[in-house]
Amino acid sequence: MSKSKDASASGIILKYLNEQNRPYSAQDVFGNLQKEHGLGKTAAVKALEQLAQQGKIKEKVYGKQKIYFADQEQFPSVSETELKTMDNQISELTSKLQEVLQSCKQLEAVYKRKDVEITLFLMMFLFNWNESAQNFV
């Protein structure tokens, strides 16, 4: 593989790991980037090993399995108060989400009842229309 393709694969993988900020195996990286970027498995493994040797990402070995993840030193540290604020925001958003989901369920139930009512109304209308048509003839 040419150096430009190696650099391209390394750049793609480095950006992906930094954006996702979670650990991945080489197989996971390959599987997640294969369709979008056309990376081969060998290219992905080489790029991951190269990035780890350069210190741009971290590598941990668990038996035969290697896990790669973004270097956490590059991200700003967060204070305890900021973490608590984020936790509170998450709790508030979770409760709002639950309220919205509950409202959706209620609206869905109303829609189903209305759908049944409309169907019954149409059946009665068609029945009456059919009767009046027969009486007309």
Image (cartoon, rainbow, N blue to C red):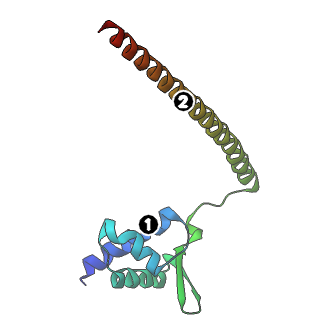
Residue at the far bottom in the pictured view? 64
Q: Is mark 2 on a helix, strand or loop?
A: helix
Residue at 63% from the left image edge and 41% from the top image edge? 97
- Mark 2 in CB contact with mark 1 (< 8 angstroms): no
Q: In this view, does 63 lie to the left or right of 56?
A: right
Q: Is residue 45 left or right of residue 88?
A: left
Residue at 37% from the left image edge and 70% from the top image edge? 33
- Residue 104 place in picture, x, y as percent: 59, 36
Residue at 44% from the left image edge and 80% from the top image edge? 27
Vertical arrangement, residue 78 with respect to residue 51, above or below: above
Residue at 31% from the left image edge and 72% from the top image edge? 8
- Circle 2 is placed at which residue position? 111
- Residue 103 place in picture, x, y as percent: 63, 33
Residue at the far left in the pictured view? 2
Q: Indicate the amino acid at tag 2.
A: Tyr
Q: Indicate the amino acid at tag 1.
A: Tyr
Q: Quadrant of the C terminus?
A: top left
- Circle 1 is placed at which residue position? 16
